[in-house]
Image: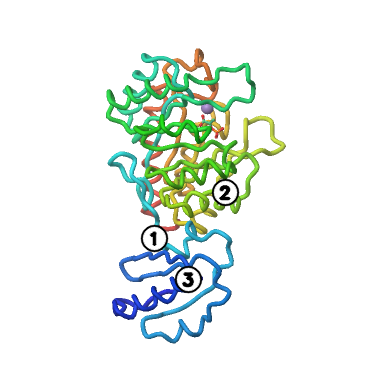
Amino acid sequence: MIVQLKKSPDEKQLQALLDWLKSMSLDVHISKGTNYTVLGLIGDTSAIDMELIQVLDIVESVKRIQEPFKSCNRKFHPDNTVILLGDKPLGGGEFQIIAGPCSVETEAQILEVAAAVKAAGAAALRGGAFKPRSSPYSFQGLREEGIRLLLQAKKASGLPVVTEIMDISQLPLFDEVDVIQVGARNMQNFELLKALGKVKKPILLKRGLSSTAEEFLMSAEYIMANGNEEVILCERGIRTFETQTRNTLDLSIVPVLKKLSHLPVIIDPSHATGYAELVPSMSLAAAAAGADGLIVEVHNNPSCALCDGIQSLNPETFARLAPQVKQVSALVRQGGLL
Ligand code: PEP
Ligand code: MN
């Protein structure tokens, strides 16, 4: 249920309403915009008499929310959520690019890529240390050593870092990681999502391989319901019958998610397409569709990469692409249609 308050509500009456709602065992999420205050009620609202609230002086309107997702629902929080990548805002009209190799491989590799993507305007460095691979015989990532090298690249470049967690037991290693990624295969690892709800840093949540928008948002809800409101939604392609691309990039989910939720939405064109030659077009299309950012795989020597080299851009192509994508994003935002 949401209660929209009139402009500048009387503080005493508001407190009395909040106390009463809390006495009904409801959690109240308060969202203050410039022109409104919205109270989002979470819990069993079936016993609440809407008319009783509606007649209060400070109340503009009361509505029941049909969707099962509450905290991430735009009706609960009409303004776009903005999440900081270091000191760079992502969302709410600010477009940012996260870039780096699929996996951290060596000190020289991650330092070189970090310097290159920073020079090209990336806001954060990605690099996998714990890798979810389809085959147990494939490179599994450098694990603790990978995190150590990534943090070394953070220090050298000044870029905040994004890396994937696969299991709750790895969390102590993520203390100095800026953004924790939950991979597509873990989107419904509910125990992991609950644990990340207790963490005070942004979570980059990837859409599961065959998840609906509602399932995706319910996974974000798991993190938010446990206390962490900083969730970045990432579309990375879904499974379809098509075999020419690794996955099928579902760009239409950008406006769908932005309508349903206030969370920032980014696109991963690398895993979505599986081929470096398809990454520029889909990156530009993502910006045109109103995405808030990208996460792109960039490798200093793609043909020798230990993981996902075929879909990794070289630093030169990334340096040409990044400013074009930002221009497209700025253009569609100025256009005012999205
Ligand atoms: C990755 O980002 O390296 C990755 C494994 O992504 P996904 O979970 O989308 O497959
Ligand atoms: Mn990868």
Q: Is residue 212 left or right of residue 103?
A: right
Q: Which residue is mark 3?
A: 2
Q: Which residue is mark 2?
A: 216
Q: Quadrant of residue 315?
A: top left
Labels 2 and 1: the sequence-earlier one: 1
Q: Position of residue 70 (x, y in %)?
A: 51, 61
Total numbered labels? 3
- Image quarter where the C terminus lies is bottom left
Q: Residue at x 48, y 55 (%)?
A: 225
Relative to the observer, which residue lies in front, 92 or 319?
92
| C-alpha gap between disc 2 and disc 1 | 20 Å
Residue at disc 1, secondary structure: loop
| C-alpha gap between disc 3 and disc 2 | 22 Å
| C-alpha gap between disc 3 and disc 1 | 15 Å
- Vertically, is 331 above or below 172? below
Q: Position of residue 102 (x, y in %)?
A: 48, 25
Q: Position of residue 201 (x, y in %)?
A: 38, 42
Q: Which residue is mark 1?
A: 79
Are the residues flagged by discs 3 and 1 in contact, CB closer than 8 Å?
Answer: no
Q: Position of residue 40 (x, y in %)?
A: 45, 67
Residue at disc 2, secondary structure: helix
Q: Quadrant of residue 31?
A: bottom left
Relative to the observer, which residue lies in front, 319 or 6?
6
Going by the numbered disc 2, the residue's amino acid type is Phe
Residue at disc 3, secondary structure: strand
Going by the numbered disc 1, the residue's amino acid type is Asp
Q: Which mark is residue 185?
A: none
Q: Residue at x 64, y 21 (%)?
A: 135
Q: Say few, some or many: other residues with alpha carbon within 10 Å of mark 2 (under 14 / 14 to 19 / 20 or more).
A: many
Going by the numbered disc 3, the residue's amino acid type is Ile
